[in-house]
Image (spheres, rainbow, N blue to C red):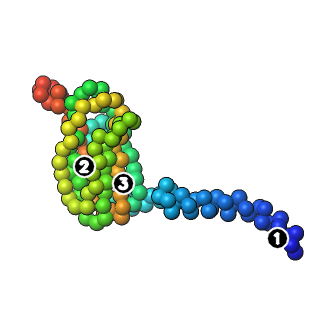
Amino acid sequence: MIDYFTENLTDIFPLIFIGLAGWLLWKKGKLKVVTKIAYVYKQGLNHLRVSFKRFNGFDEYSFWLKKGASMTLVYEVTVEQGELQLEWRNRKKQVWKHVFTADESGTVSFTAERHLYVLQLDGKRAKGGCRIELINQKAKKGGVS
């Protein structure tokens, strides 16, 4: 009987170890479970629309910009429940970050130091959505889009 138990214990030990490691990572906040219910998005070259009935977790959207361009990020966020955090960054640094608990809109102006930028959405039991548009200020001033 004891031999049977020790043989099975050695087979189960890796599963116990993986389960314990997963639980510790989840408890420390390093491992997240993403929930998306009625999550719909539409992304173009310079715009993004996202709506959801339930969003818990994170998602990322990439945008390719002309290096050195003066840009304005226009956002319109709707939060009916929970909270939604938006973070705009390139590979090296964070440009802007804001936590929304209610409807809000605004703009963020910056100069593109790199080509690749990422918008990260982080929802905490959120219901709502957002609209993002990137406007090149030099193109707008010159009259040619």
Residue 130 position, x and y percent, is: 26, 52
Q: To which residue does mark 2 refer?
A: 131
- The type of residue carrying mark 2 is Arg
Q: Nearer the viewer, residue 65 or 1?
A: 1
Q: Does 104 appear above or below 113?
A: below
- Tell me the residue at 26%/26% (across/down): 68
Q: To which residue does mark 3 refer?
A: 122
Q: Residue 139 sits in which quadrant?
A: top left
- The type of residue carrying mark 1 is Phe
Tell me if mark 1 has few (under 14), some (14-19) or many (20+) residues whose alpha carbon lies within 10 angstroms of its own: few
**Residue, far front:** 28
Q: Which part of the image, by quadrant, shows the C terminus?
A: top left
- Tell me the residue at 36%/43% (across/down): 61
Tell me if mark 3 has few (under 14), some (14-19) or many (20+) residues whose alpha carbon lies within 10 angstroms of its own: many
Circle nearer the N terminus (3, 1): 1
- The type of residue carrying mark 3 is Asp
**Residue, far bottom:** 1
Q: Does 105 appear above or below 9?
A: above
Mark 3 and mark 1: span between their CA atoms? 45 Å
Mark 2 and mark 3: span between their CA atoms? 15 Å
Q: To which residue does mark 1 refer?
A: 5
Mark 3 residue element: strand
Position of 67 with respect to 33 (left or right) is left
Residue 124 position, x and y percent, is: 36, 61
- Tell me the residue at 86%/72% (across/down): 2
Mark 1 and mark 2: span between their CA atoms? 58 Å
Q: Which part of the image, by quadrant, shows the N terminus?
A: bottom right
Q: Residue 21 sits in which quadrant?
A: bottom right
